[in-house]
Image (cartoon, helix red, strand yellow):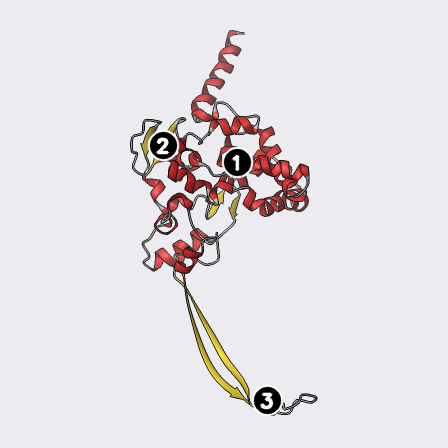
Amino acid sequence: MRTVCLFFANIAALLLFTLPASFAKEANTVDELIAMFDDSRCAECHEEIYKQWQDSWHSKAIVSSLGGMRNFIAIGLSKEWKTPLTKTQVLKCLDCHAPAVNFASEKLAVEIGEMIVTAKDKAGTPEGDKAKKELARLSVGCLSCHNIKATAVAIGLRKDPEKGKVYGPNGQDSDGHESVETVDLSRSVFCMQCHGIYKAIDGEMIQCNTLSGSYQNMYISAGGSQTCQDCHMKKGHLFPGGHDLETVKEGLGFQVEIAPYRHLPGKIPGVKDSKKWVPSAVITAFVENKTGHRVPDG
């Protein structure tokens, strides 16, 4: 009996040692999950940054993308691939759209996936609205980037993020938390974790957009030097992109050439005075892509 007890004790210790501190306990409810990565206190010291984030699309990363995620679950998994909904499958969407779900239990992750389908398919009904309201509480929050994803670019080099620590590009000290300098947050490769090709836990490669590919193959390879952050953090943590008109204007050059002329169409049966000269014009529009990636994309 002593040998068996020691065996199980060693296994338990191994699990706790190999998993990040915040993995030691999985959340069984959305409330528990949010409490694990509660970023509301961030506003106490970083009020302006927090307000910018609240107005950003990162803060509504699930509810703004319900259609695509619903199709992945209800059509892709259920109908086309005959694959059961599991946490591994849910994370193929939510590892980016709500990274905290990595710390949800299997049961909770599946429930969140089902909520996505309900929120979309029953939109406008009490049941659908309730599901959407619950999903809106999950998003790409402060700790999604400044903890969960902070070291994922090179996990073998950086190691797992430590619970309770906040990772940033400069590691500035704070009275509210322990800070860790991580230069990865200021590099494009950090953004590429989600805005590019994603490798799921089961090895599947998922490409929801082609931003990282066009950025590397068409911009960096041609001598470009700006990072994602150089353009998309000009307004701080608002992360302006295709939804921001000023950013679109900066990224696209537009020129129109108009050549006026008159033409004689000839006699048109049933049309009075159809032999008169008709004012016409040839309009040529030139659109220049000034961004570091293909447009449109996301």
Residue that numbered label 1 is attached to? 138
Which of pointers 2 and 1 lies earlier in the amino acid sequence?
A: 2
Residue that numbered label 3 is attached to? 265
Task: Depth check: give the residue in front, 26 or 171.
Answer: 171
Which of the image's four quarters has the N terminus? top right
Q: Nearer the viewer, mark 3 or mark 2?
A: 2
Which amino acid lies under the numbered mark 1 shown in the image of this protein?
Leu
| Other-residue count near label 3 (Cα within 10 Å), few / some / many at <14 / 14–19 / ≥20 | few
Query: Is the C-beta separation of discs 3 and 2 under 8 Å?
Result: no
Is residue 141 placed above or below 225 in the rendered structure?
A: above
**Residue at the top extreme of this rendering:** 2
Q: Is residue 119 visible?
A: yes
Q: Measure the C-alpha gap from mark 3 to mark 2.
A: 71 Å
Residue at coordinates 39% horizontally, 31% vertically from top-left?
44
Which amino acid lies under the numbered mark 2 shown in the image of this protein?
Cys
Task: Depth check: give the residue in front, 192 or 138.
Answer: 138
Q: Measure the C-alpha gap from mark 2 to mark 1.
A: 22 Å
Which of pointers 3 and 1 lies earlier in the amino acid sequence?
A: 1
Is residue 63 placed above or below 21 in the rendered structure?
A: below
Q: How many numbered dots are placed on residues in this image?
A: 3
**Residue at the front extreme of this rendering:** 272
Q: Position of residue 157 (x, y in %)?
A: 35, 35
Is residue 213 placed above or below 46 in the rendered structure?
A: below
Residue that numbered label 2 is attached to? 45
